[in-house]
Image: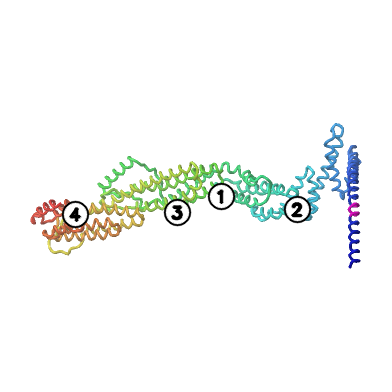
Amino acid sequence: MAKLEEKNKAAVEAFHELDSRINNVATKVVYLGDQLENVNTPRSRAVEAQKLLTHFNGFIKPGGPFSPVFSDKEQLFEAADIIQKLQLVAQELPSSKYSGAQKQIAQKYDEIERSLIEEFAKAQVKGDRAQMKHIASILSHFKGYSQCIDAFIEQSQAGAFSSGDVFLDVVPLCERNAREMKEVFHNPEQVMGKFILNIFYGKLQGTISTNLADRSRPDIYLKRLHELYSRTTKLSIDLARYDTGNDHAFLSKLVKNIFQRYLESYISLEIRNLKERSATVLKKFYEYKNHQKKPINTGGIQELRRDLQAVIVAKTGAVWETHGGETFLSEQIAVSLLDETKQALIRCHSLSRSSECAANAVQILDVLFQFLIDEFVDYALEIGLQAIPPGESKVQPELYFFGVVREVNAIVHLMDKLFHDSIIPLVVSTPKHGECLQRKKTISEQLENKLEIGVDRSLSAIVGYVKVTLQSEQKKGDFKPEGDEAVIASPACIKVCRFVSVQTERIRNSLDGKNQEAVLNELGTRFHRVIYEHFHQFQYNSMGALCAICDVNEYKKCVQEFKVPMVTTLFDTLHALCNLLLVLPENLKQVCTGDQLAALDRSILSNFIQLRADFKTARLGNYIKTLSEDK
């Protein structure tokens, strides 16, 4: 073991000695290499300068002789390297002495540059990306490097737009060429930017110009403009995934530049088209109705004219003009006008500058108010108001205004929806927001005012006819019959109830919610007042009182259709008052202090008691005095 340890120790020492010698040799080799490089670098530069000088001498004399490298196609890349350096050298020399050489070098420079571009194109056709990359690298030092990129773009886009829809071809085309750009060019983002630029100002702009050349039909033109702009904008968003350089607004600028001349005059054409389309919709509607629009006079003159017509009708029995029950309104027409406006607002949102969008939207809203409200709804309201017969007519009135109310409410509801869904988003957070809200509020108040006038006139016509009918057809003998005839409701009552029931149905079909309740409540109140006052025109014996109660029962059935508790209560109270005409004198006090009559003013009770035929014979005057004293 000791011998082996000695041998191992000797071997280790020999290894360290050998390692030390190797390090010394390596150090000397490195030193010698540095010395040789210091000597060879200037020498190689001198050799290269000598070669360039030799090549330069060939260009001093007109026509050469040039070095064979410039005529050998196999040495194109070497020739390119040489001519590129000669071009740099020639630029530094004085033109007065070397203009001939400079000119010949420039010519050869252009010739080799063209040859390189041709070779690049051939390599692209073959799909030889390595060769393309090599040539592109050489050309990157040439002035015509951009022509290499142009050649690449031209070849890449040749025959690429074959689907018939350029918008569908662009993204796949860029996708196919993006990887090749990265492999071939040292600046792929600039190449992609130019690639997209060529598409936009080439095929895309050509397609847009062709489709927008015809402006004879503004509606079709605007639809095409919006579609093309929207698709181009979407395309720019889809292309944003590709790196096109440092300009982040590059794509949006392209879209803006292409469409600039079309968008400058957009809103004026939009407004003109909307007016024409809206006017056409209304024109066709009135033609279908065989109606010639006429100017409507409003204010005091119109009211005076209406009063004169009412007098003429009352004296001559002429028929009041109701236009055959035509409301001159249509939800379908309103929907057409609103749809035209909605499409205009959609285009306004897309095609307007952000700074002009709100103002443009207000212009469109003005057109909507002009045609939908002023020329359609308001005109129909005025016609409807004129068609309402005057109150207290002897002829049963034909009332169609409730149909007008129904149509107007439906149309206003549709307009409100468009206003909130399409107008407000375009004007919110701008000074135009408050202006739009105020305009709409003013218009709504004007419509509501005319609707209220029309409803009031219609209710007056209803209760007026009821009053006239009762006055002309209710006989005194109905409530003071002689003999024991069957007690039934009077013919006048039956006629009135049938008429009121028809009008009630019209109201219920035309109005809903609180509006319906309010109108029926008003009608019920007025109807009750007419019946109440009508009963005060007669005297009643016991049989007549039963007839009056029968009439009141019919009236109660009639107003039950109103489904308004207050009106029902009024007629229940009237029924209780009629009982005062029937009960025995000694029971009057008990009836007067009953639940239904106790709260009434004693003068009301006294007035009813005085209608009894036995008021004097039964000496009920004393009871009335007692009733007043109890109060």
Query: SS class of the residue under badge 1?
Result: helix
Q: Which mark is residue 183?
A: 2
Q: Is residue 24 magenta?
A: yes
Q: Is residue 589 left or right of residue 401?
A: left
Task: Specify start and end residues of the magenta stretch as a single range.
Answer: 20-25
Q: Nearer the viewer, residue 73 or 484?
A: 73
What amino acid type should be assigned to the residue bearing mark 3?
Gln
Q: Earlier in the sequence, mark 2 or mark 4?
A: 2
Can residue 585 be seen by looking at this rendering?
Answer: yes
Q: Which mark is residue 535?
A: 4
Between marks 1 and 3, how big is the CA–CA gap? 22 Å
What amino acid type should be assigned to the residue bearing mark 1?
Lys
Q: Mark 2 or 4, which is nearer the eye?
A: 2
Q: Is residue 357 magenta?
A: no
Point out residue 310 in the picture as x, y percentages from the top left corner: 28, 46
Between marks 4 and 3, how big is the CA–CA gap? 48 Å
Q: Quadrant of residue 86?
A: top right
Q: Which mark is residue 184?
A: none
Residue under the image location 23 percent in, 52 percent down:
530
Between marks 2 and 1, how big is the CA–CA gap? 42 Å
Can residue 275 be seen by looking at this rendering?
Answer: no
Q: Is residue 246 left or right of residue 5?
A: left
Point out residue 407 in the picture as x, y percentages from the top left corner: 39, 52
Per the image, the residue denoted by label 3 is 332
Q: Which mark is residue 223?
A: 1
